[in-house]
Amino acid sequence: MNINRGEWAVFWFTIAYVGVFTAWFFAQGNFEFIWYVITMVGIIALVARNLRVAEFSPALLWSLSLWGLAHMAGGGVQVGEGVLYSLVVLPVAVNGELTVLKYDQLVHAYGFGVTAWMLWHILATHFPPLRNSRSIYVYPALGAMGLGTVNEIIEFIAVLVIPDTNVGGYYNTALDLVFNASGAVIAMILIAMINRRQGAQ
């Protein structure tokens, strides 16, 4: 496979932090996040396999990698008595599992915003007739929401397989889905605005 220097930089950066956090999770006995490391390795392999077909931009690859880093840090960096994922960034509402706005929720919004961007890129690259339609923004948003649901299924499997996970209950899952959808919709609105501005020039 023909991989350019910039793509290798993203790859080795990603492998480095995955390796560091994997060692940390093992040392802490955090087997919940080992499950997520396995998932992440699968995503890295999927992106790498389709690199030349999809022709992801450097910005998109770095954004995907930073999402992975934010996820690993969320479960591995201690903040007070908990981990970064539990950190309340802005106390919009504080009520147990209905607490908003947490680091976890920001990572969900960012991550599935990037996912929607990736799906938009694939459609724009391989189905150019869609470029002037609303579908090119609607389908990536819906697709990102669907992949967000897959993420929640993976978390549910972790709850079933691994004792004492920090996944959370019903409200946590519902908020995750809300922030997944919010990130996806915001990403598509921004891309539509950028495309419209560029088309007007």
Image: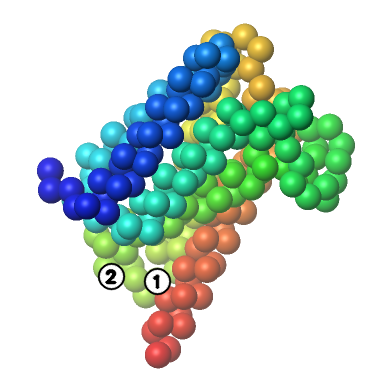
Disc on res. 26? none
Disc on res. 129? 2
- For the residue pair 149 and 10, the one nearer the viewer reads as 10
Which quarter of the image is occupied by the N terminus? top left
Disc on res. 133? 1
Label 2 – label 1 distance at C-alpha: 8 Å
In the rendered image, residue 199, in percent from the top left (x then y), is placed at: 39, 84
Determine whether the residue tagged by mark 1 lies in a helix, strand or loop: loop
Camera sees residue 74: yes
- For the residue pair 36 and 199, the one nearer the viewer reads as 36
Determine whether the residue tagged by mark 2 lies in a helix, strand or loop: helix
Camera sees residue 170: no
Quadrant housing residue 57: bottom left
Residue at 62 percent of width and 53 percent of height:
182
Question: Dot 1: few (<14), some (14–19), or many (≥20) neighbours within 10 Å?
Answer: few
- For the residue pair 11 and 172, the one nearer the viewer reads as 11
Residues tagged 2 and 1 counted as in contact (Cβ below 8 A) = yes
In the rendered image, residue 85, in percent from the top left (x then y), is placed at: 66, 34
Which quarter of the image is occupied by the C terminus? bottom left
In the rendered image, residue 74, in percent from the top left (x then y), is placed at: 60, 34
Q: Is residue 139 left or right of residue 53?
A: right
Residue at 64 percent of width and 17 percent of height:
165
Residue type of the residue flagged with mark 1: Ser
Residue type of the residue flagged with mark 2: Pro
